[in-house]
Image: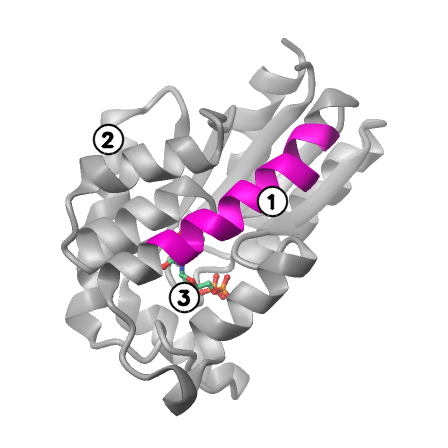
Amino acid sequence: MTGIFITLEGGDGAGKSTQAELLGQWLEERGREVVRTREPGGTRLGAELRRVLLHGGEEIGDVDARAEALLYAADRAQHVAKVVRPALERDAAVVQDRYIDSSLAYQGAGRVLDVSEIRTISEWAAGGLWPDLTILLDLDPSTGAERRRARGGTADRLEAEAIEFHAAVRDGFRALAKAEPHRYLVVDASQPVDQIHTQIIARLATLVTR
Ligand code: TYD
């Protein structure tokens, strides 16, 4: 594969979609085909899984942590097979909101499942595909929640979790980044949008000229 696979990670309200949009534009200006996508929900099957996972409400009752992990893995399997791999095979740049690291941080660190087990099922689901670059937009979870409230959004099933859950997720992401500095770029997401973009581009420039 000669495409480039970039994922954005971080908590609620960290600004992933804004940065994904700016990054996509930057790559397009350099003549790349860009596929913007996300997990969960990047396929038709995934859209159904996303609805259940985030907005299932009373209808689905209490979701067991392992069941949740497998639903995210199912979404990922379909998405990698139908969207991500085909795009990379035709040399596109895939700019994706959330991937395996979200499962490791939310289901592993957040739900306190064994991170190595989550890694195993996620890798199996993804057929071993890892990103070329993962951008962690690191933000204090209380700031993220404030931003969401300011946007007037209502909390989905995961956003509604306690602050301790979100703090564990953040620590989980930071530990992942520390363990794999060659794949990760950690950016302080409390900075202005253009400054964050500049830092992302500086790192990406080393990758796209490879
Ligand atoms: P999304 O709308 O992408 O969240 P945000 O706007 O905060 O980026 O919703 C995805 C939610 O699903 C988010 O709370 C994180 C969670 N999630 C997991 O728990 N595990 C996963 O593997 C993925 C991809 C997402």
**Observer able to see residue 34:** yes
Q: Do the residues labelled 1 and 2 touch (CB within 8 Å)?
A: no
Q: What percent of the width, then of the height, locates residue 195?
A: 53, 47
Pointer 3 or 1: first along the chain: 3
**Residue 76 sits above or below residue 126 on the image:** below
Q: Name the residue under label 3.
A: 12
Magenta span main SS: helix
* Range of residues picked out in magenta: 70-87
Residue kind at label 2, given as amino acid type: Lys
Residue kind at label 3, given as amino acid type: Asp
Q: Mark 2 points at which residue?
A: 178
Asked whether mark 3 lies closer than 8 Å to ligand 1, one says yes
Q: Mark 1 points at which residue?
A: 79
Residue 189 occupies quadrant: bottom left
**Residue 163 sits above or below residue 2 on the image:** below
Pointer 3 or 2: first along the chain: 3
